[in-house]
Amino acid sequence: MRSDDLKDLPPKPVMLDVAAARAIGPEAAAEANWQNKIRASEWRKLANGRGPGSAIDDQLRLLRAAYAEPRLRRLYLWTSHYTLCFSLSTHWPWTHEGIPFTDPMGNGIYRVRRPFSLDVLGSPTSPEEAVALVVEHLPPDLGPLFNRPEG
């Protein structure tokens, strides 16, 4: 990218300190992390000038829908290649505990899969439906969120 291109970028968002939030507790760490993921996704959408139907827009819509669901918002979110994954641990290695993950496939299609499997649970046509499918397949005995010691 040329320096001329950089001056047209929106200012980067202020990110929350997840490590400091971890010191408060796992719930604070999860909330700070969610806020950072949403802020970063909003910034990428603006910076890339991508609109509806783009992978960035689809991920942002999915993030917002997942954040609106209290049973997912209480979990620690991590992402990879636009995929939303959920963990009970606020630090790597992640603890999936059978929690499905979801990703935008393009053209308004979202995929929900079992963790560590190629099993597709469904291909909803909205982020809200994808989130509902993830929630429907949450393990009933899902444990508490916890801070895993670093190192």
Image (cartoon, helix red, strand yellow):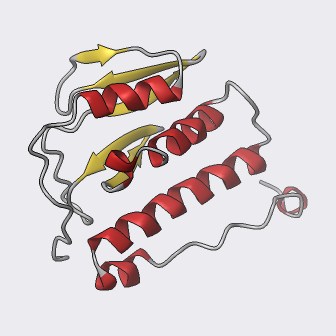
Q: Position of residue 75 (x, y in %)?
A: 30, 54
Instruction: Kindly give the residue lying farthest to the left in the view shown.
Output: 141
Taking the image as shown, residue 130 lies to the left or right of residue 36, namely left
> Does residue 115 lie above or below 68 as drawn?
above
Quarter holding residue 100: top left
Please tell me which residue lies in front, 137 or 95: 137
Q: Position of residue 93 (x, y in %)?
A: 18, 58
Taking the image as shown, residue 134 lies to the left or right of residue 46, namely left
Quarter holding residue 151: bottom left
Image point (45%, 69%), residue name: 32
> Does residue 58 lie above or below 90 as drawn?
above
Image point (16%, 52%), residue name: 95
Image point (48%, 38%), residue name: 82
> Does residue 106 lie above or below 86 as drawn?
above
Image point (80%, 41%), residue name: 49
Q: Position of residue 59 (x, y in %)?
A: 55, 37
Q: Position of residue 125 (x, y in %)?
A: 52, 15
> Does residue 83 lie above or below 32 as drawn?
above
